[in-house]
Image: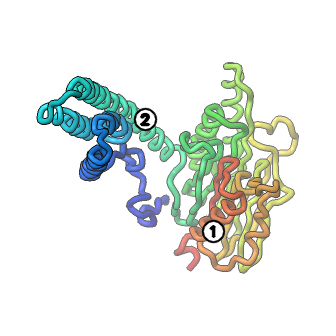
Amino acid sequence: MFRPLRAAMSPAQAPTDHDDTTAIRTPATRDVVLATLATTAVVIVLGLLTGTAVLLLGLLVFLPAFAAALCSPRQTALVSGWVSLVVVAPVVFQPGERVLNRVILTLFAVGFGALAVYGARVRVTREGALVRLRSTAAAMQRQILRPLPLLTDDVLVDGVYEPLQEDKLVGGDIYDVAATPWGTRVLIGDVQGKGLAAIGMAIDVVGAFREAAHREPTVTALVDALEAAVVRHNDYAGRRGEPERFVTALVLGVDARTDTQVVGCGHIPPYLLHEGAVTALGAGEEHVPLGLADLVDEPRTVAWFAFPAGATLLLCTDGLTEARSRDGAFYPLEARLRGRVDITAGRLIGSLVDDVRNFTAGVQQDDLAVLAVRRAPHQAR
């Protein structure tokens, strides 16, 4: 049985079809009015003190242009109307020898105001299109990569996923969790290369995992299904003249038993954290990445290891292990994991991500995917 941990998320984090982070943001009308009045007051006072009222009032003509860049069309129209009123008033109530200057300034104010309103409408229209596009991309990401944390009858999986290019939302790193009749299967992987072609391969591998995880009774058969999906994708890419790609992957099989299965396909081995000790599992037993099975004669086999209650399995991509400091040193993952005792999955991920950001001085160099797997609470008890 598969249960997303919706209750573990705050309302702001819970995924919805309408993501507030993609909404068009404009300042409050009250703030716009106060800023406009304050600017007008400053210009009028300076004009009275310096005797250059016409010159300083000319500065107000450009105020709607600033409003057009930040405000809604209605707010921009409000600012434009006010500026036109302030510029026209001296022409009506204080005629003098410089009436022509004031009339020209009034025409400029009205013309610039109209252009500002039009510019605000164009900007809002374009931003609306970008919001709809980003909302669609966010919905697609939630279908490709399920939001974390996730809870099954066997494990609790928490983690973080940060693509290098935030505007794409999905990168070459992949993960998924499937609750099957044979226990819980966990996938983490990394597609070779970057760009949209790598994302296409990632979608195919995740889709193959979700289908085969419920069909294949063994982990090795599941991995063979993933291999076939990568081969099919490469065949199709080759017919279009695109380069073939491979995928490093790690597949876990966890059930009610203490022993757990893992098949590594050229991927970073999982780390077992238990009672302050850190162990790299399956190191030296990795197989070739997905898509390269035809190059070797040995079939992929399962490695077994103990996964006791209270232990944590850490799965990651090379965005973590190959993160570099300013002097070029690699992030010492195993050393940073030592000594951690009874740390929850969420705290482990949060502390690791903060640590690697400090190590790299905040510079992200690759897609980053990190998963922490623990026995489900009722299994641990």
Q: Which residue is depicted at the point 72% across and 62% down?
A: 359
Name of the residue lying farthest toward the left: 93
Q: Is residue 49 above or below residue 105?
A: below
| Neighbours of disc 1 within 10 Å: few (<14), some (14-19), many (20+) | few
Taking depth in this image into account, of 128 and 65 the one nearest to the observer is 65
1 or 2: mark nearer the eye? 2
- Residue 144 x %, y %: 53, 44
- Residue 199 x %, y %: 61, 37
Left or right side of 234 for 165: left
Can I make out residue 135 in this image?
yes
Left or right side of 202 for 279: right
Q: Amino acid at mark 2?
A: Leu
Numbered disc 2: secondary structure: helix
Task: Measure the alpha-carbon separation of dots 1 and 2.
Answer: 34 Å
- Residue 174 x %, y %: 62, 47
Numbered disc 1: secondary structure: helix
Can I make out residue 211 in this image?
no
Q: Which residue is mark 1?
A: 351
Q: Which residue is depicted at the point 79% across and 69% down?
A: 335
- The quarter holding residue 193 reads top right
Q: Which mark is residue 130?
A: 2
Taking depth in this image into account, of 55 and 273 the one nearest to the observer is 55
Question: Counting residues from the N terminus, which is met first, the one under dot 1 or under dot 2?
Answer: 2
Q: Which residue is depicted at the point 59% across and 69% down?
A: 345
- Residue 31 x %, y %: 28, 52
Q: Which residue is depicted at the point 74% across and 29% down?
A: 244
Taking depth in this image into account, of 335 and 376 the one nearest to the observer is 335
Q: Amino acid at mark 1?
A: Ser
Q: Is residue 378 above or below residue 14?
A: below
Left or right side of 28 for 364: right
